[in-house]
Every structure is written in C-alpha cells, then in structure tokens.
C-alpha cells in the first residue's frame, strides 16, 4: 500500500525556506517482506539531517550517504537493496524482502513553488499526485488526467482510485506516481458505547475522527478524549465540516432526531461510505422516514444497514470491529 507522509512535505518546504539543500528519497518498488511500503519518503539535507523512513532504519544510513552525492551533483539515483545484495546485508536489510529507492534533488526555483502547491493541496484535502521522472528526477504535480500525457492517464486514474503509489509508463520513460489522497475522515453521529472502541480503532488506522452528538452527558472528554467533539445537532454541525469523497459518515444512536439528519446530509454528499446501526426492522422504519423527508430510494440504497461486516459480532468492541472492517473494505474497493 502507499504511505507518503504529508507532514514531510510541509517540513521540506520549511527546510527549503531556511536555505537548506535537500534531497527526497522515495520507495518506488518492493518485493517480499519489505520493511516499508511503496511511497514511503525520506527527506535529507546536505548536512545529513533527515526525517521519515524508507526502510525502518535498515538502509537509511546508506541512502543518506547517496543523497549527499545527489545534492552535490543534482543527478538522481535509483538504489536497490535485497537479501542477496552484499551492500544490503552490510546495512542490515535481512528481512527477506527487497526495495528500490529513488533519490532526487529538491533544488531550483520550481521546487519551492511545487512544494508550496503540494502542501496547499494536502491541507485543503484536494487529491494530488507527485510525479517523478525516474530518468531525470524532474518532478511535477497532477490533479486530474488533464495534467498528464495520454500514456500516463490510466496509471494516474488507477493510483487515485486504489489509493496506491505506482510506476507508470510515460512518454519518455518510467514515471513514479506518489499519491497524496486526503486521509480518511470518519464522522460518527452518536457518542455511544460502540463509538468508544470504534474511535480507538479508527485512530489506529490513521483516520481523522469527528464525533457529533448534542447530548452533553455523552459527548465528554472523559469518554472521547483526543478526538474532535462537536456537541451540536448533525444538521447544524455537518455543513461546516465539509463532507467529501474521502469521508465515511455513520449513525449510531437509534434516535431519529440525531440519526436521520446525519443520514440525509450524508446521502446528499460525496461520502464514500454511509452506515447506520440497527436491525432490518429498524432500518425499514428508517427508510420510510427518509422517503417522507424527500430522499430518493436510490440514494437510500447507499446506506450500509445493518452496519458492519457480518462476523457474528457480540458486544460493543466486536460491533465496532465489524464497522471498521467494512469501512476499510469499501475503501479498498471490496463489496459485501
């Protein structure tokens, strides 16, 4: 899976504005049990300071040494480490896998503008890809098929759709596509006992979590410390959040005054996942109410209800697990 760290882009911009000369190392291919996934980044300056990781510590020292040459010469390098490589053994890559790493300079006036635009897209939750010509090291941004040559269009579309960094065949050679999709945002309507373990699981998955519940006794820091709490009614809170195509929105209260406005807003948005707690009978009553509220039947069909994968869940923690698993499955293009 892809794993570019958005915080490294902001740090690269900060370091560049401080006058540091920089290189960026990127994992562009892996085999076997590689220590870090494709898309992982390592930011290095000319003094050997670094942030990020391309191997969990196995080959960082070697990559940093090579980055010094890249910064000095401006010429990119592609490095390979594997268990049959004596160099890899000497630097500790004995996990049974292999990795291919591209190291390129972040120099020139265009680099600052490119990093600034990339950081802005990430902050605004706009999907964007950083494209690197592996032969020349040249980098550019792409936000849609209109930004690339026809030969790269299917690769860019696949990268965005699968949330996966990959190498595509460009017009003049291979191009690495490093996707910076917005992080998954999970909005939970209902600060319930199921929401508590679900929040912990979602945070472990690096989701941005927001809990919405107007009931002051439920939406407390003691029960949900560390996540954003909105003690408002969903129809008041949700318009200000900005529900987009990287948002999952679920209703967990069984209270129509809270759940229904949440679902109505979700079904009129680009949310990729909409779920609601309750039995089939409960959902049938819910469908009737939503139709009376003017929601189209086709839209109502988007609701995952009963919510979660059918794992025979018992208790709050297992129900939360089934919900988290279903959201992850939908994210990866898996259906029920």
Image (spheres, rainbow, N blue to C red):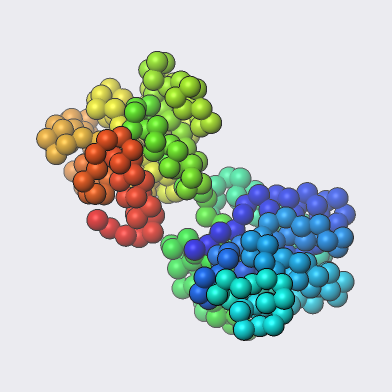
- In the rendered image, is residue 272 in sight? yes
- In the rendered structure, the answer to whether residue 137 lies left or right of residue 222 reads right
Q: Is residue 226 above or below residue 120?
A: above
* Residue in the foreground of this view, choosing between 26 and 160: 26
How many badges with numbers are in the image? 0
- Which quadrant does the C terminus fall into? bottom left
Image quadrant assignment for residue 335: bottom left
* Residue in the foreground of this view, choosing between 251 and 101: 101
Q: Report x, y in % for residue 149.
A: 56, 75
- In the rendered structure, the answer to whether residue 50 lies left or right of residue 126 reads right
* Residue in the foreground of this view, choosing between 317 and 67: 317
- In the rendered image, is residue 137 in sight? no
Q: Report x, y in % for residue 12.
A: 74, 54
- In the rendered structure, the answer to whether residue 264 lies left or right of residue 107 reads left
Q: Which residue is drawn at 25% across and 24% down?
A: 255
Q: Which residue is drawn at 76% across and 67% down?
A: 61
Q: Report x, y in % for residue 258.
A: 31, 25
Q: Is residue 124 above or below residue 251?
A: below
Image quadrant assignment for residue 193: top left
Q: Report x, y in % for residue 32.
A: 51, 74
Image quadrant assignment for residue 49: bottom right
Q: Residue at x 34, y 50 (%)?
A: 325
* Residue in the foreground of this view, choosing between 86 and 165: 86
- In the rendered structure, the answer to whether residue 78 lies left or right of residue 17 reads left
């Amino acid at each position: 899976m892809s794993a570019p760290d958005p915080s490294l882009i902001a740090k690269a911009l900060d370091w560049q504005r401080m006058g540091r000369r920089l290189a960026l190392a990127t994992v562009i291919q892996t085999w076997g049990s590689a220590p870090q996934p494709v898309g992982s980044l390592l930011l290095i300056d000319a003094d050997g300071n670094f942030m990020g990781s391309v191997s969990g510590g196995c080959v960082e020292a070697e990559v940093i040494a090579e980055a010094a040459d890249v910064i000095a010469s401006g010429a990119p390098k592609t490095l390979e480490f594997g268990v049959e490589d004596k160099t890899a053994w000497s630097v500790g890559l004995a996990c049974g896998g292999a990795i291919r790493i591209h190291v390129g300079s972040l120099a020139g006036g265009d680099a600052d503008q490119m990093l600034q635009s990339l950081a802005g897209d990430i902050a605004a939750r706009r999907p964007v890809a950083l494209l690197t010509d592996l032969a020349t090291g040249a980098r550019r941004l792409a936000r849609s098929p209109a930004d690339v040559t026809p030969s790269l269009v299917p690769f860019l579309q696949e990268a965005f759709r699968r949330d996966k960094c990959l190498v595509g065949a460009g017009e003049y050679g291979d191009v690495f596509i490093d996707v910076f999709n917005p992080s998954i945002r999970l909005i939970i309507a209902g600060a319930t006992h199921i929401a508590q373990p679900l929040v912990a699981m979602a945070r472990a998955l690096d989701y941005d979590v927001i809990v919405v519940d107007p009931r002051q006794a439920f939406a407390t820091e003691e029960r949900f410390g560390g996540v954003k709490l909105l003690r408002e009614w969903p129809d008041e809170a949700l318009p200000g959040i900005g529900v987009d195509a990287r948002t999952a929105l679920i209703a967990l209260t069984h209270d129509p005054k809270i759940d229904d406005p949440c679902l109505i807003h979700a079904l009129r948005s680009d949310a990729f996942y909409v779920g609601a707690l309750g039995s089939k009978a409960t959902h049938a009553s819910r469908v009737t109410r939503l139709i009376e509220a003017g929601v189209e039947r086709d839209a109502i069909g988007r609701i995952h209800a009963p919510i979660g994968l059918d794992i025979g869940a018992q208790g709050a923690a297992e129900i939360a697990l089934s919900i988290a698993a279903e959201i992850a499955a939908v994210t990866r293009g898996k259906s029920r």
